[in-house]
Amino acid sequence: MKKLIFATHNQNKVQEVKAVFDGFSIASLADLEYHQEIAETENTFVGNALLKARHVFEVFKTPVFADDSGLEVVALNGAPGIYSARYAGEEKNHTKNNAKLLDALANETNRVAQFITVITYKDATTELTFEGIVKGVIAKQASGSGGFGYDPLFIPEGYNNTFGELPKEIKLRLSHRSRAIAKLHQYLNSIR
């Protein structure tokens, strides 16, 4: 079984990836006991994913993939964007992020948004990027305890419930991360 490193400390992301990614052994940074935070200093999702993948590949010399994800809200000119995890502060508090987003949209009728994930894969000879997007709207209040981050606020197109309310298997099928991971998985299967 081919070994891959997923360059993240976020166990919620690891669970999502492992649920849709078969045939490979995936280790997170926590599994490898690598606890250093990798500063996301780029100003795009692609730049941050590439930065993390390159950093981890240099440390472990093992094929790696890294993601950068976020929520883009049309009425907020794409914010919180690359700052989604730290929207309300450096502590990455989901509850505070959601409250800040609802406050920013309090008087806004245009609640169109999208989740985006960019995944960069790196090995000794290759660097590739894969993107997944899911479009939807921001609810007027948080609802549901499933998922994480902005999931209790995000209603995907074609549904009346937030990602926080939808069954896990539906969220996995629809999610931006699942869509990007499926593209990476297809590529890796094609080169076996």
Image (tube, rainbow, N blue to C red):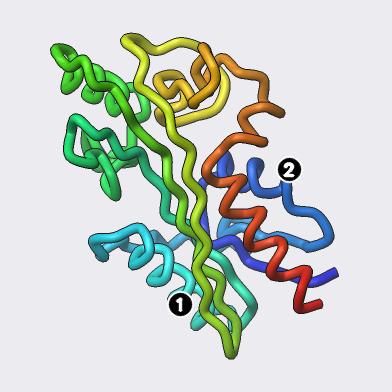
Q: Is residue 80 above or below residue 185?
A: above
Q: Is label 2 in a helix, a strand or a loop? A: helix
Quarter of the image where the C terminus is located: bottom right
Q: Residue furthest front?
A: 158
Label 1: how many Cα within 10 Å (few below 14, some 14–19, many 20+): many
Q: Residue at x 23, y 41 (%)?
A: 78
The residue carrying mark 2 is 19
Would you place residue 92 above or below residue 116 in this image? above
Viewer-nearest residue: 136 or 55: 136
Please state which of residues 113 and 101 is positioned toward the viewer in this rendering. 113
Tell me what residue is drawn at x 35 percent, y 38 percent. Answer: 71
What type is the residue that disc 1 sits on?
Arg
Task: Residue 184: name its quadrant.
Answer: bottom right
The percent coordinates of residue 25 (x first, y second) are 77, 62
> For the view shown, which residue lies furthest in the bottom direction?
125
What is the number of the mark on residue 106?
A: none
Residue found at the very far left of the displayed protein: 107
Going 57% across and 39% down the picture, which residue do you hit? 12
Residue designated by label 1 = 54
Q: What percent of the width, then of the height, locates residue 140?
A: 32, 10
**Who is closer to the viewer here, 178 or 142?**
178
